Amino acid sequence: MKSSPANSKHRLYAVAVRVTFALLSLLIGAAVVDNTVHHKWRISADMAHMIDTNTTDSVVTRWNTESARQFENQFALVINTPLDDAAYNREDAIEAAIDAFETTHDALFVAVDHSDSLSPLVDKLIQHRFNFTDTQAGRSAEDVAAAIVSKAYGAGFEGVPGLSLRNDPQGILQARLNEFLPQPQADVFANRIAIINDNTPPSLLLSYQIQGSGLDLATQAKLVDAVDQLESALAPLLPEAQLWRLGPVFHAQFAAASMKSDLSVIATGSTLGILILFLTMFGRPQALLVSIGSITFGFATAFTLCNWLFTQLHFIVLVFGASLIGVCVDFSLHLFARYYQTPEENGKQVFSAIFSPLLLSLASSVLGYLCLSFSGLSSLQQIAVFSCLGLSAAWLFLGTIACSLPSANKPALLLPWLTHSLSAVIGKGARKKPLINSALFAGLIAVAAASALLYSTSDNPRLMYHASPKLINDLKQAASVIQEFDPSRAILVSGRSEEAVMQKLAALQTLLEQWRADGLIAGYRSIHTLLPLAQEQRSAFARNDRLYQPGGAVYDTLISLGYPVASVAKAGEFRLLTPSSLAGSSALTQNLWVESGDEVATVIELKSPDSRRLQAAIKKLNDPMVVFADRAADLTHILATIRHKAQSLLLVAYLMILAMFVINYRSLVALQLIAIPLGSSLATVAIISAFGAINAFHIFALYLVLGLGIDYAVFLQASRNNPDASTLAAIVLSALTSLLSFGLLGLSQTPMIGDFGITLSLGIAINAAVIFLHFLISSCATTNNSQSVHKSNG
């Protein structure tokens, strides 16, 4: 018996979909094996990884990279507590508790002993000690001798470890080191340094280096758990103590835990709502299970292949990818709304009947997301590839399952009621079609004007995370006790030679003092604090050569104090101490010198810089050798760059989809269809701008508003000549499921997730409302609707 052309078409679609699905499954299997063998499952939480910052290998880039890596892998604990008799009675137990904390978790972090870093620095200075001169170079020989004797007998020698009267008799190196590393008033308690402050109780400072990455989520969780255990162990020993936690690892863990908690509650609520909606509408789990399978397969495919293709994935890519649930569910709803409305047809026939609009909806969505790949930014390229792979895989899964479904035989539970109710609405406003069309056009113009007038942006990364009030308070409290240099802001003086950089640095000293007096900075230090210029080193060497010869003040004084002649070092030959050599000698100085290619730079570390005023002051210098490096501002720049790229490519996506529509439909129809998501996006931007500012996450959400709007528009056009209540029912259900999925995101305490959810909710609601109006003014509500409803009820 010869098969009909319709059956041949059904079989052709089924074979094509199944073969493609099988090939994709094989590719996923190979990728899973390769990812596992080569350990490619990597997720990054670092905002800096969202943009390719190494396109130019400059000293500023190098400093940003290195300082960020060090900063994110360091943390400190400050135990602020009264050191009374009770505390000293428990000193051994307190020391044991801290020792246990450090030894138990030595694979996670190691204690930082600054004296270990001080020793190689002192050794380097001693080797070149004759290159340094007394700041009071005009002192007489008698004054020099008297100062040395005073150190030996009178005041005692309060030296830096490693320095002695023999190798630093005039205290020159000691003076420079004390200026470079000012020592606060301190005591020793529990074998740790206790900083004494007039306004607060003493503070035990514990510094640590993380073994691995402080941005690793598992490391963060383990570290916070370990610190919690230490706090519990110290509580009975130091009842009045406060434990202040300092370091980005704690803020990152809090933000991640906050997001996880929000998403867990939101996911539970939205999943429950979607379950109830599916079961009440369709009356059986079939549609729900297929939808979940489609979403899971799509996400798993995208996650596996993107890990295979890229070095690492950023967590924002996963957040955006997870939100594709709304578009994936759309495909399932259109399939099952028709499947249960025509129970006499099997799944292959239903899939074939809506194949064209389903394929066009997929193609337009993929085309829209594909535009992000032209950004040149790896993060947006990842989002583009993840979205395209996820949607395509979900679509193939749905098609494969649909082609295996038998006839439904009986209608769904409440779907016939919903379809019947909607069929009664279709065409009711046909007489007012010109008026409503005019109103929609005027509304489009109005929201375009409003969004243009109200449009404002914000790219501040601090406004995108949920910050911990306790951690912020810890930072403020510790700042009054520990005067640390800002790890994320510095002045860089760069040039082509070390001597040119050092001379420019020396010339800046007067200006730095003026900035400190004016309140632009609270303090500063640089390698110039330790190291004289090359010319100054030569002059110092010549003067010391005379002082250390027989008859010289230093030589004669040391001999008179009983030092053997052999132990009184002679100056020898001059050896220049270079800034790169000094910086590389110790961890205390390694951050003060940066080299990249032919360029070198010295770093001026700052205390409490007023970024805005300092940036303006440096810009006013108009000196290309002097740059203010601000890593927080760089993160803002990263987000601004991503936002600019994303919003520009969103416009490109609209134009490319419009071109596709023009090819498939006539020009006027294409404009009408693209106007649906465009108007929704503009209205959403206008509403958000009226109450706040637009950021990158609002723009990301607008891509989904486009995807869902295009999906609605394609199916609207597919039933324009024969308005189908099942199509409208699918769109209504899609809007409801999307609002349940994304609407609750707007309640998140994490601002970027809340922004994403609010934008999607507004865009989806406006999309659905416009589609409903189009069905309302449809000029022909056909008998097919009532017939299909009658059959489903029959």
Image (cartoon, rainbow, N blue to C red):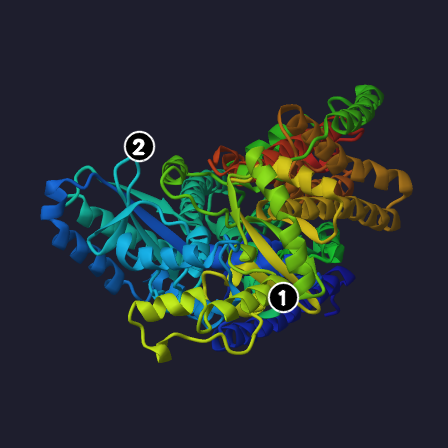
Give percent across and percent down for residue 189. 20, 51
Give percent across and percent down for residue 654. 79, 44
Packing grade of label 1 (10 A; few <14, some 14-19, many >=20) is some
- Is 792 left or right of 284, judged from the image as shown? right
Task: Say which of 276 and 412 sits in front.
Answer: 276
- Is 159 left or right of 86, judged from the image as shown? right
Q: Which mark is residue 738?
A: none
Q: CA distance from mark 2 to mark 1?
A: 42 Å
Figure check: 385 above or below 31:
above
Q: Is residue 360 visible?
A: no
Q: Amino acid at mark 1?
A: Glu
Pointer 2 or 1: first along the chain: 2
Give percent across and percent down for residue 498. 65, 65
Tag 2 near tag 1, CB within 8 Å: no
| Occupied quadrant, residue 672 | top right
Q: Amino acid at mark 2?
A: Asn
Secondary element at image label 1:
strand
Give percent across and percent down for residue 193. 27, 52
Q: Which residue is the site of mark 2?
A: 199
Q: Quadrant of the N terminus?
A: bottom right
| Occupied quadrant, residue 717 | top right
Q: Is residue 760 visible?
A: yes
Q: Which residue is the site of mark 1?
A: 595
Please, which residue is most extreme toward the bottom here? 566
Q: Quadrant of the C terminus?
A: top right
Q: Residue at x 57, y 42 (%)?
A: 461
Q: Residue at x 24, y 63 (%)?
A: 104
| Occupied quadrant, residue 793 | top right
